[in-house]
Amino acid sequence: MINFKKIELNDKQWMEPLLDIADLPGGHQNFTNLFAWSETYHYLVAQVKGYLVVKGLLNDLPYYFYPAGSGDIEIVFEAMQQDAASSGHEFVLVGVSPEDMAVMNRVFPDRFEYEEMRDNYDYVYLVDKLVTLSGNKLHAKRNYINRFKKEHLDWKFEQISLENLANCWEMNQEWCKINAPNESVSAQECCAVRRCFNNFVTLGLEGGLIRAEGKVIAFTMGERLNSNTYITHIEKAFSAIAGSYQMINREFAALIQKNYPEQIYVNREEDMGFEGLRKAKLSYHPEKMEEKYFATYCE
């Protein structure tokens, strides 16, 4: 069996280099996401032959992520298969990309059955498009921004720092009271967001906020995901304030473009099957979707 352990903050030192080498596009293949959601999904991690292997648990179903690293991946898959057999459960992977499938089918020809995970597809946008909002399809976004500027002449964008982090947490608490879709999801998300706030510097997170009348009315947090993509982990705004979401989205995209000119895309993660969130993310017309599949090994 693989010698797994719970994720701790100092595991970033060995996990992140393996994730960097793998250069994977999925938002789940990221240390911050693994650490922040580790209590919810019971993530365990191990290093196997130069690869990061992640094991999780959802609705009593144990599963693995596609291994991240470099070297002989066949040995790693064999170790994962043996771990599943020794643990007495099916060998299942989640978040598998079409590129991952090609490798898995080479290692285990015709042994995996795949099922689409549409609710977990990541929405990926061109950074430049989020900044310029050019074209007829994004005309409404530009209108919202113009309206916001007219109604809030004293608006201000700030980068998140230790000096204003507490202001964002206060706004987050207020947002949760207004927007929680249900108590269970709210508690899980609150736990993950709190972990990001409590470890903002150590995780290497960056962020931005919008003030209006001196009060934080929107904020966002993210980091570099891979060689050409930035990832946004959290974005909150008061929807009652017209244009607040559009403003924080555009202003932070402009900051990404300025600080990371090599980053072509922004991965804004999944919609989790929430209809309102899906509609909002589709309204920005993603450049592409990072497809994810559920893979079950069949004897």
Image (cartoon, rainbow, N blue to C red):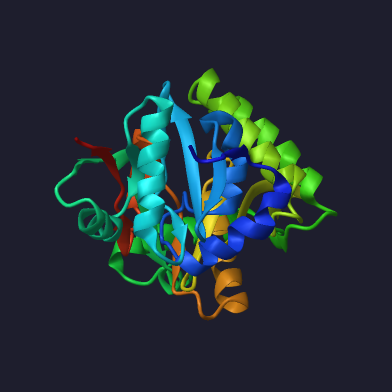
Q: Residue at x 47, y 49 (%)?
A: 28
Q: Position of residue 108 (x, y in %)?
A: 22, 51
- Is residue 102 visible in the rendered structure shown here? yes
Q: Residue furthest right?
A: 163
Would you identify the image quadrant in which residue 253 lies?
Answer: bottom right
Q: Is residue 154 left or right of residue 244?
A: right
Examine the rendered structure and indicate whether residue 11 appears above or below residue 266: above
Examine the rendered structure and indicate whether residue 254 appears above or below residue 26: below
Q: Residue at x 49, y 44 (%)?
A: 54
Q: Is residue 14 left or right of residue 77?
A: right
- Is residue 206 visible in the rendered structure shown here? no
Q: Position of residue 118 (x, y in %)?
A: 28, 42
Q: Position of residue 51 (x, y in %)?
A: 49, 57
Q: Position of residue 182 (x, y in %)?
A: 50, 21
Q: Residue at x 53, y 54 (%)?
A: 30
Q: Residue at x 27, y 41 (%)?
A: 295
Examine the rendered structure and indicate whether residue 12 appears above or below residue 93: below
Location of the C terminus (image quadrant):
top left
